[in-house]
Image (cartoon, helix red, strand yellow):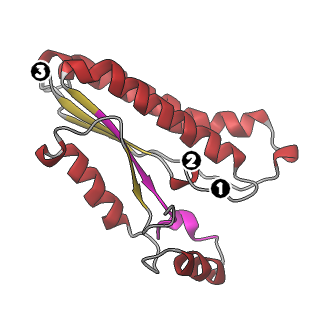
Amino acid sequence: ENGGGRSVDVLVNNASAPFSPKPFAELDWREVESLFEVQLRGAFYCVQRALPGMLAEKSGAIVNVGSILTSAPPPAQWTAFVMAKAALAGFTRALAAEYGPHGIRVNLVSPGTTATDAIGGLPERLRKVQAMQTPLRRLAETEDVARAVVFLCSGAADFLTGIDLPVAGGISV
């Protein structure tokens, strides 16, 4: 329940942290841990807080936002990020299996490169190359990801749980 005494029907875990690619040999565990803190620990506590109300209602939708990099070849030097997002994907599947019998659906949306401030440091040339490697020939927009999340939270997805929905313009085909 929240402060108003109502149950949470939908939970979207979409937290992220600043990340700088780094060769694995130079990676410090604290850097990995900081990504796990945001990606996994944040989702862990949010789910724990929302779960009692969802269990009482015997319904609910949880959507975690992962990354296409857990199923497509990741770029070099992204080990820490991929580790954190892969853990979030495993967390999603485990929750789906455990809480599906209680009417709670848990899914993952995995965006490809998305036009946000987070990619502001990428050179324009690299963004264009990434878009051209995508069958739909563009990067994802935040609205593309939002629509996938809304779909998974809607009644149209009532029989979907434990899925990883790529929102990446076909980059993983």
> Which of the two marks, 2 or 3, is nearer to us in this view?
2
Of labels 3 and 1, earlier in sequence is 3
Q: CA distance from mark 3 to mark 1?
A: 39 Å
Secondary structure beneath dot 1 equals loop
Q: Which residues are magenta?
A: 106-121
**Spatial separation of the CA atoms under disc 2 and disc 3:** 33 Å
- Contact (Cβ within 8 Å) of mark 2 with mark 1: yes
Residue 30 counted in the magenta span: no
Q: Nearer the viewer, residue 106 or 40?
A: 106
Q: Residue 43 in the image: state x and y as whole percent.
A: 43, 32
Residue 17 drawn at (x, y percent): 56, 48
Q: Which residue is mark 2?
A: 70
> Where is residue 155 shown, x and y percent of the image?
11, 44
Mark 3 neighbour class, 10 Å CA radius: few under 14, some 14 to 19, many 20 or more: some
Residue placed at 49% from the left, 62% from the top? 112
What's the mark number on residue 57? 3
Q: Nearer the viewer, residue 10 or 99?
A: 99
